[in-house]
């Protein structure tokens, strides 16, 4: 599994447009092949900062979405609303079982 976090800073006046876009497309993103989970988070201190948190089967599934018509529709529309460049990273979970004394 691959976990993807994308941190986006919006112009305050663009937040409603972003939220409308996200809510209009989230179900279609969740239906993309290999997408297991998608959430939207809002920064606790800056209400114009949001993160998408998603789980993908693997890097190939994420790249498949990035090459899709849906991504070609959603990402450019989202980028137009930014006040600063997005910061994105992918991580893989590590299963570690530890006992605390």
Image (cartoon, rainbow, N blue to C red):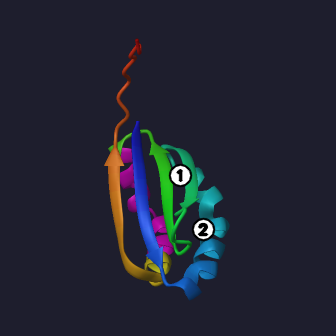
Q: Horizontally, is 21 left or right of 49 in the view?
A: right
Q: Which residues are magenta?
A: 60-75
State the image quarter where residue 37 is shown: top right
Give the percent coordinates (x, y) of residue 35. 51, 46
Q: Which residue is mark 2?
A: 22
Q: Give the structural element (helix, strand or loop) at label 1.
A: loop
Total marks shown come to: 2
Q: Residue at x 64, y 80 (%)?
A: 16
In front: label 2 or label 1: 2
Give the quadrant of residue 2. top left
Q: Is residue 42 left or right of residue 57?
A: right
Residue sitting nearer the eye, 41 or 71: 41
Q: Which residue is mark 1?
A: 32
Q: Identify which residue, 32 or 44, lies in the foreground.
A: 44
Determine whether 41 is above or below 77 in the image.
above
| Residue beneath the point at 36% across and 21% down | 96
Coordinates of residue 52 in the picture (x, y in percent): 50, 58
Q: Is residue 5 above or below residue 98?
A: below
Main SS, magenta region, reads helix
Q: Residue furthest bottom?
A: 13
Quadrant for the C terminus in the image? top left
Residue 62 is inside the magenta segment: yes
Residue at x 61%, y 81% (from the top left corner): 17
């Amino acid at each position: 599994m691959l976990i993807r976090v994308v941190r986006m800073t919006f112009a305050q006046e663009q937040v409603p447009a972003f939220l409308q876009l996200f809510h209009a497309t989230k179900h279609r993103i969740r239906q993309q092949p290999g997408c297991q989970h998608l959430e939207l988070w809002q920064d606790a201190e800056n209400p114009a900062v949001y993160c998408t948190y998603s789980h993908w089967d693997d890097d190939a599934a994420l790249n498949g979405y990035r090459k899709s018509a849906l991504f070609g529709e959603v990402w450019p529309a989202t980028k137009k609303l930014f006040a600063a460049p997005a910061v994105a990273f992918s991580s893989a979970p590590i299963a570690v079982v530890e006992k605390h004394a």
